[in-house]
Amino acid sequence: MNNPQEERTVILIKPDGVKRGLVGEIISRLEARGLKIIALELFSPTRNQIDDHYPKDETWIRRIGGKTASNYKNYGLDLKAELGSEDLLEIGNMVRGWVLDYMTSGPIVKMVVQGIHSINMGRKIAGSSMPSEAEMGTIRGDFSVDDATAANRNKRAIHNLIHASETHEEAEHEIGYWFSPEEIHSYKRAEEDIMF
């Protein structure tokens, strides 16, 4: 990327966002911010597709287990009594499995979004991945109240409506993973000359 206006990221509207009819609202918020949708598709992913989307490395899985353990500690809950283990890798794999179940529970919308700082902007518009902590005015803050403790107690993933790539490397990997070059379009939005 040479021009900051050409930064690209992946946004996925998760099954709960699609089922709740929030696709238009989410796209509208991205476009209102000056981001450009350059690829878009509604589809039902296979478990293998979602499994390959999420990292499988031990460090990432332990980090997920660590977040879960931290959440349990914050609320004074007994991790081992509820989840049967205190091993962060085991817990991370358990949570990852729930995420795979969740992401294949219905159709999702995948898109490539382009614009100035689109990666950071996409995450800012989405809000904290923990909806109960997301600021009002963000997608998660306005439309979801789910929490890790509630999700874990029900043996499911957090329903947080949207995925937004976290880093440049992740965005490039996800763009190549979910889209062929022919599916990504180049065009100029009418207001680009005014905005930039």
Image (tube, rainbow, N blue to C red):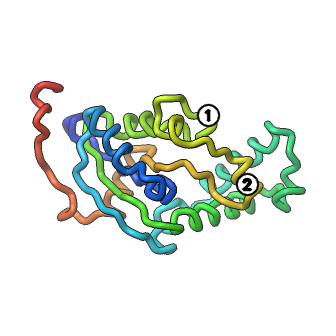
Q: Quadrant of residue 92?
A: bottom right
Q: Residues within 10 Å of mark 2 (few under 14, many from 20)?
A: many
Q: Which mark is residue 151?
A: none
Please state which amino acid type lies under the numbered disc 2.
Asn
Are dots 1 and 2 in contact, CB under 8 Å? no
Q: How many marks?
A: 2
Estimate the x, y position of residue 13 in percent, counting from the top left.
42, 53
Estimate the x, y position of residue 188 in percent, counting from the top left.
11, 41
Whether residue 126 sits left or right of residue 193 in the image: it is right
Estimate the x, y position of residue 77 in percent, counting from the top left.
86, 45
Which residue is located at x 77 percent, y 55 percent?
Answer: 153
Q: Which mark is residue 152?
A: 2
Inter-mark Cα distance, 1 to 2: 16 Å
In the displayed structure, would residue 117 be above or below residue 27? Answer: above
Q: Quadrant of the N terminus?
A: top left
Q: Which mark is residue 133?
A: 1
Which residue is located at x 59 percent, y 61 percent?
Answer: 99
Q: Quadrant of the C terminus?
A: top left
Please state which amino acid type lies under the numbered disc 1.
Glu
Estimate the x, y position of residue 59 in percent, counting from the top left.
62, 54
Q: Quadrant of residue 146?
A: top right
Element type at mark 1: helix
Camera-side residue of 8 and 130: 130
In the displayed structure, would residue 163 be above or below residue 108? Answer: above
Camera-side residue of 146 and 183: 146
**Between discs 1 and 2, the one toward the N terminus:** 1
Which residue is located at x 56 percent, y 34 percent?
Answer: 134
Q: Residues within 10 Å of mark 1 (few under 14, many from 20)?
A: some
Element type at mark 2: helix
Which residue is located at x 65 percent, y 49 percent?
Answer: 63
In the displayed structure, would residue 51 be above or below residue 189? Answer: below
